[in-house]
Image (cartoon, rainbow, N blue to C red):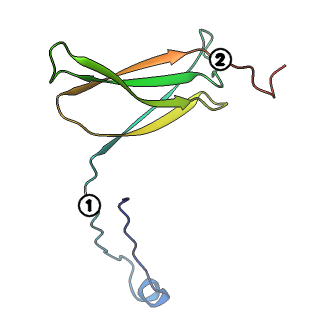
Amino acid sequence: MSSYAEIVITPRELKLHRIINKKIVVKRKRTILIEGKILDRKSNPIDGAIIAIKKIDYNYKPYKAIDIAYAISNKHGEYAIVLEKLYNINYKIKVYEPQIKLLNQK
């Protein structure tokens, strides 16, 4: 489920008031957004880099490392992943070079 809120400002409100106060309440999410940018040594973005995220769970002895998400960077080197926020959990991010040659690359 996603949280969503909407307000409507009528033309009458805009015409009658210089300042309009509206209240929006959005339910707190239990997710986190991990985003980043993959660059080479010359600060050029890397298209198609693979980003792997592992959950490191210290509730076990020895700890458990479990793959939970993957992403591929876009032509600007950017990626974003939404994960469930968990307690007593660390996240480990590994980045791998592109594994296939993209069609638009020569």
Q: Which of pointers 1 and 2 indicates the residue nearer the eye?
A: 2
At horizontal 34% and vertical 23% (from top left) the residue drawn is 66
Amino acid type, label 1: Lys
Pick whichever, 92 or 65, lies toward us: 65
Identity of the residue drawn at 35% across and 61% down: 3
Is 2 or 17 nearer to us in this picture?
2
Amino acid type of the residue that numbered disc 2 sits on in the rendered structure: Gln
Above or below, comparing residue 15 to residue 94 in the picture:
below
Crowding around mark 1 (Cα neighbors within 10 Å: few <14, some 14 to 19, many 20+) is few
- Number of numbered labels in the structure image: 2
Q: Position of residue 69 (x, y in %)?
A: 44, 31
- In which quadrant is the N terminus drawn? bottom left
Residue 18: assigned label: none
| Image quadrant occupied by the C terminus | top right
Q: Residue furthest right?
A: 106
Using the image, determine if residue 22 lies above or below residue 100: below
Task: Classify mark 2: helix, strand or loop.
Answer: loop
Residue 17, position in %: x, y?
A: 38, 84
Q: Earlier in the sequence, mark 1 or mark 2?
A: 1
Answer above or below: position of 6 versus 14: above
Q: CA distance from mark 1 to mark 2?
A: 40 Å
Residue found 45% across the figure and 83% down from its top:
14
Q: Which residue is labeled 1 in the image?
A: 27
Residue 81 drawn above or below residue 65: below
User: Which residue is at 59% across, 29% downward?
Assistant: 73
Q: Quadrant of residue 76?
A: top right
Residue 34: % across, % down = 40, 34
Give the label on residue 99, or none.
Answer: 2
Quadrant in the rendering for residue 23: bottom left
Q: Secondary structure at mark 1?
A: loop
Indicate the position of residue 58 as horizontal and vertical percent values.
Answer: 18, 21
